[in-house]
Amino acid sequence: MPVQRTLFGRPIGPIHPRKLAILLASVALFALFSLLFTLPSSIPAGPSLSKFTAGHIISLPKFPKAFSPNILTVFRPAAHAPPVQKNSTSGDVSWYSNWSWLTPFSSSVTLDENRSILPPLRQRPPIYTYYDRTVKRDQEMKNAEDTLLFTWRRAWWAQGFKPIILGPAEAVNSPFYAELQMKNLEIPLKNAIMRWLAWESMGNGILCETLVFPMGDQTDHLLAYLRRGEYPKLARFDKLGRGLFTGSKTDVMAAIKQALANPELKLAKDFISAVDAKTFYIDPEHGSLAYYSESVVKERYGKLAAEISQDGPNGLITLNKLINAHMHVTWQNMFPKGIAVLKPKPKHMNTLVEPAHKLAEFLAYCPESPLPASCPPNHQRCSPCVSTTPMVTTTPYTYRNTTGLYTIGTVPHPYTMAVFTQLRSNIDIPWIRRVSNRDEWLSTITKELLGNGVSGAPRISKFKEIVASPHGTSHTLWIPAEKDMATDLGWTFGFTIPRNATNGHSETPVPGPERRPIPVQDAMNGLAPSNPEEIEKEMALMTIAKEFGKARTESEEKVKNALEAWNLADTEAWRFVRAFMARQKMEREQWEEEEKAFLGG
Ligand SMILES: *[C@@H]1O[C@H](CO)[C@@H](O)[C@H](O)[C@H]1NC(C)=O
Ligand SMILES: *[C@@H]1O[C@H](CO)[C@@H](O)[C@H](O)[C@H]1NC(C)=O
Ligand SMILES: *[C@@H]1O[C@H](CO)[C@@H](O)[C@H](O)[C@H]1NC(C)=O
Ligand SMILES: *[C@@H]1O[C@H](CO)[C@@H](O)[C@H](O)[C@H]1NC(C)=O
Ligand SMILES: CC(=O)N[C@H]1CO[C@H](CO)[C@@H](O)[C@@H]1O
């Protein structure tokens, strides 16, 4: 008797071997197609989960299911890692600058878990000023002028430019130098033309007085235009006089030629009057440029003008303080909603976000100013910082893209995050697998922006955009939790961040409790009033987390790997921010190294 075959419990008739082969082939084909179309499109080349999960069933991180052409790339032989770029390593952090930086997981491109993709560095157009170090001055004056030059360089650097100080050495390189020497001009006029020769020898760009400062939002039209680095016309700005010129090398050459050919050159007061008025296009809009020219200081800051004429060096130092204070106030005015210090786990993160909180406090301080109620020359209706109503600092649990709100985020390594969620340092693998939530930090930070039901990949792309897009770099600051706060943040903001200034040396009359600013709290979090014991515990854990980042035992290494594998998106965010900050620092240090020779004292 033939064997009775069944399918889903029903008897079926005998199958011809030929039919059976066709059936099997169809099943195989079906299996292959299901495999092709359901594979995750971007499995990162990070640590594998399998070594921690043998024998346990866990869910893989969710990836977007949408079909994308690179699904098939998993069947290609492994590609080579992209070439290592110049100067792309700092300590244990390395990066690869490429336009594909919004790729959720860098390692899917760099094939190296430690190498993050960053956006290409924005080209910084040069901005030139002229300072003649060969002129005899006494030491005090030199120091005062150097202080001003420093403030000028820092302010323009923070706005995305490459400030360069030119001197007579550059002017000598100009083909017009010999001709100028033969003209026998008065010193002030000769110097005015020397600036132009120095500029001409450098090529396209911006020629700027040392007392012109950018004071405006990074997204301001004029600053954005200047940053583009292309200046089709030789231009100056209405009412700014010789404060700022833009132009291409050919236009600059033509203007110099014209000036030197002018038979009445000797009668001219400065370069502008030495050439035809039509030489310049006059731009009426310059709202984001503050020029502290002699006449402006005399007119608006009379007390200061008197001090400068009485005691030059000290007057300049005071002027420098005033400029710094105005830069700070301009920044504060850009963020009327205050500063948000992210605190994704309100309960136990006091110590973790403490440095960020401190920084926010410093930024909210009223800067030390010789004329506290004054406004910058380009923004006369600013709201001066009043110590009785300082900028508010909030501690929301999530990132919000609110106009007028500055955000400072602290990015912890998954280990740090685990330690602080649990308030204990002995993290074990069963806890990671069974209890801990995947990518808790990132999902909390992006909860309001992206909602709940979103996987890690789109979250991390969004996060990278928040951190590193042009809008992001001027509205947010992200710091790795385990590192000490950078000491050079002045270069990011463009002004000196007050460190220990007491907020409100003018807090008189002492306001009653009802008039004191109420610390605005986020409705959804409330500042956790940790008791002293808990704070002590948090501080001990912070030390442990920092140590953990430096050296680990073998079993700790396992925990670290397990945590990183479990929290792929959190780890990616942490690496991204570290690399981003490291590159920023390197860029500046390199430029300072290049410029050191020209900075004098
Ligand atoms: C980015 O990567 C692509 C593909 O790997 C490459 O062709 C391109 O040159 C890279 N761009 C930069 C700026 O490195
Ligand atoms: C990444 O860095 C860690 C620690 O610095 C190191 O142990 C690991 O081997 C590195 N991975 C690769 C692929 O280089
Ligand atoms: C935040 O908002 C600004 C404009 O309001 C927008 O340009 C920017 O792309 C937004 N950023 C993110 C990360 O959504
Ligand atoms: C700030 O600290 C420095 C040195 O630590 C000190 O000399 C200075 O007086 C302090 N300033 C204020 C306003 O406390
Ligand atoms: C900081 C740093 O590593 N700078 C290096 C960048 O690359 C140039 C040339 O490759 C080196 O000379 C610098 O030392």
Image (cartoon, helix red, strand yellow):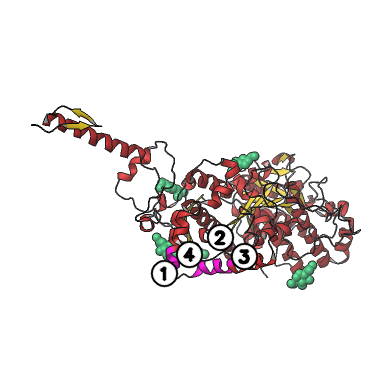
| Mark 4 residue's CB less than 8 Å from ligand 2 | yes
Residue 204 on image: x %, y %: 60, 49
Foreground mark, 2 or 3?
2
Indicate yes or no: mark 3 CB to ligand 4 under 8 Å.
no
Q: Quadrant of the N terminus?
A: top left
What residue do we see at 62% from left, 47% from top?
399
Can you identify the residue that label 3 sits on?
538
N-term mark: 1 or 4: 4
* Inter-mark Cα distance, 2 to 3: 10 Å
Number of residues whose C-alpha sits closer than 10 Å to that of mark 4, classed few (under 14), some (14–19) or many (20 or more): few
Q: Are marks 2 and 3 in contact (CB under 8 Å)?
A: no
Q: Please tell me which of labels 1 and 3 falls first in the chain.
A: 3
Neighbours of disc 2 within 10 Å: few (<14), some (14-19), many (20+):
few
Mark 3 residue type: Glu
Residue that label 1 marks: 554
Image quadrant, ligand 2: bottom left
Residue 266 x %, y %: 77, 52
As measured in the structure, the alpha-carbon distance from the residue carrying label 1 to the one carrying label 2 is 22 Å
Residue 130 in view in this figure: no
Residue found farthest to the left: 1
Identify which amino acid the numbered label 2 is placed on. Gln
Sequence-earlier tag: 4 or 3: 4
Near-viewer residue (588 or 183):
588
Callout 3: SS: helix
Residue 422 bears which disc, if any? 2
**Quarter of the view holding residue 307:** bottom right
Instruction: Check disc 4 and report the residue beneath it.
Output: 92
